[in-house]
Amino acid sequence: RVGEITDILGELHARVPITALLAHEETGNAVTYARDIRVARWCRKRGIPFREFRQHGVLRPNPGRDGWAARWEAHMERPRLAPPDALVAPDESRGPRGSHEVVAELGLGPATRAALRQNGGAREAGALLTSFLLARGREYRQTRGSPVLAWESCSRLSPHLAWGTMSVRRAYHGATRRLAQLGEPARIATEGLGAEDVALWRGSVKSFLSRLSWHCHFIQKLEDEPAIESMCMARSCETLRDGLDADVVAARLAAWQHGRTGYPMVDACMRALVATGWINFRMRAMLVSFASHHLWLDWRSF
């Protein structure tokens, strides 16, 4: 369904009464947090239990930073629950719409490079994790920063972690299992891995595990201090861009958004992001840094 969440819940509740609402706990920004508050309020008014289940390492309510790393690892080590064998919708007359219908309704249009756009769903997420840990990720540690090589060597799991089709814990379990396999002589022999291969794989898997921790660590910063989403961490910087010509700012922003700044590396990365919906993390950092520091755009404008 597409629409305001409480409106959609109201429509569903009118057709088939909702007895409980279960969801994974989404840790995003102020927009998603406010949405979750609206959902909780909607449920309370109707006496509907609303339970959220944590699947990332972000702690809510926030217990403070002391001991965070140990709590994160303890949560990641917990066993995952087995998924249900099947789910049956109460209204069999209208099943889930296909992805093409949703794309059309959102007005996204056809992808210019459809082969590089990623499909959604838990099955697709699992396939990506498997291919990364068994084939694509061998040189992840060395190539994750390359705007060219990262297309294959990175996990490409970021949209799945963001939208909940894979939990950080599942990715963590897969990576730790792979790390254990790389210490098993029989498994190494079966895969035909030499000493150099094993060293590369072990380094890459360990780096991937550290990135999973980073993922939650930086989101936890927003939980600790939500104001940094809308205010400068150094409050003295709030007025640095005051007085800039609005037309100049708009022109610079448009040039940046469409890859027309005149800086080849920046423009190539932005055009790749627009065309495919993905760019590796170091190029994402470069794009935002360029916009803030070189184009002098307010980071809240993009």
Image: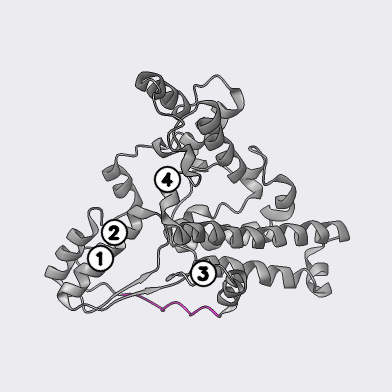
Q: Nearer the viewer, residue 111 or 201?
A: 201
Element class at badge 3:
loop
Q: Is disc 2 in contact with disc 1, using a CB cutoff of under 8 Å? A: yes
Q: Which residues are magenta?
A: 79-87
Instruction: State the CA–CA distance, disc 4 to disc 3.
Output: 21 Å
Instruction: State the CA–CA distance, disc 3 to disc 1.
Output: 26 Å
Q: Say if 117 sits above or below 260 in the image.
A: below
Q: Which mark is residue 35?
A: 2
Quarter occupied by the N terminus: bottom left
Point out the tag, 3 or 2, that comes first from the N-terminus. 2
Q: Is residue 255 left or right of residue 132?
A: left
Q: Which mark is residue 231?
A: 4
Element class at badge 1:
helix
Looking at the picture, how far across and down is residue 288, in whole percent? 52, 37
- Foreground label between 3 and 2: 3
Q: Nearer the viewer, residue 67 or 45?
A: 67
The local crowd at label 2, few if under 14, some if 14 to 19, many if 20 or more residues have their Cα within 10 Å, is some
Point out the tag, 3 or 1, that comes first from the N-terminus. 1
